[in-house]
Image: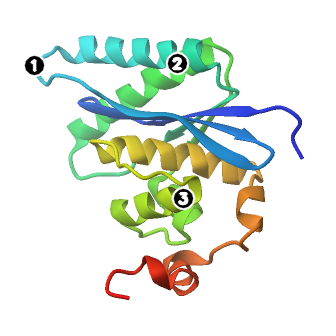
Amino acid sequence: MQKSAKIILGIDPGTLLMGYSVIRVYQGKITLQEMQALKLSGKKDNHERLHLIHHKVTELIHLHKPHEFAIEAPFFGKNVQSMLKLGRAQGVAIAAAMAAGIPVTEYSPRKVKQSVTGNGNADKEQVWKMLQQLLNIAEAPKYFDATDALAIAVCHHFQLGGTAALKKNKPLNGWSDFLKKNPHRVKGH
């Protein structure tokens, strides 16, 4: 079992909305430190937005001093321009972490969903509901980009072998298993 707390910064990159989340893991217990989204104006120049992303990630690193940095990998889309912009946003966030000497790990959206819910095709609402259960969070943030960033950080913790928090109640095997073990959480029951 780990002796000191581990801080993980999770980033859901984007050029208009960048989700970010910081979790603290101590003795298998995950505690949410921060979960927000950086909203950037579409009226700003692309380079200015990239600068703001880099600045925000650097600020988060200085504030929370994370040991690990996890980010969502770009996914293949139909719009090449959107993919290029997303890749740039991801790149400046990674550069900030690397400049601070923090190890960087990328996860595909499917891997994050699989890790958190047991279903690689889960929708954002399913991921959020599972995160609420795991971390005992009541209120949702304004943007799903923030919850996506939290999912990325939690996924990274699980990939590092951090399942101690789940062992107490036996790991869930997907969304249907969660529903079977928690019938009181289903509306209408």
The reply to whether residue 73 is visible in this rendering is no
In depth, the one of 84 and 141 nearer the eye is 141
The mark that comes first in sequence, 2 or 3, is 2
> Looking at the image, which residue is at 76% across and 49% down?
28
In depth, the one of 26 and 115 nearer the eye is 26
The mark that comes first in sequence, 3 or 1, is 1
The reply to whether residue 16 is visible in this rendering is yes
Q: Residues within 10 Å of mark 3 (few under 14, many from 20)?
A: many
Q: In this view, does 152 lie above or below 54?
A: below
Q: What x and y, as percent, mark residue 108?
A: 50, 52
Q: In this view, does 54 lie to the left or right of 62?
A: left
> Looking at the image, which residue is at 59% across and 61% down?
115
Name the residue beneath numbered marker 3. Answer: 111
Name the residue beneath numbered marker 1. Answer: 43
Name the residue beneath numbered marker 2. Answer: 95
Quadrant of the snapshot with the C terminus: bottom left
The amino acid on which the numbered mark 2 sits, given as a three-letter code, is Ala
Q: Measure the C-alpha gap from mark 2 to mark 1.
A: 24 Å
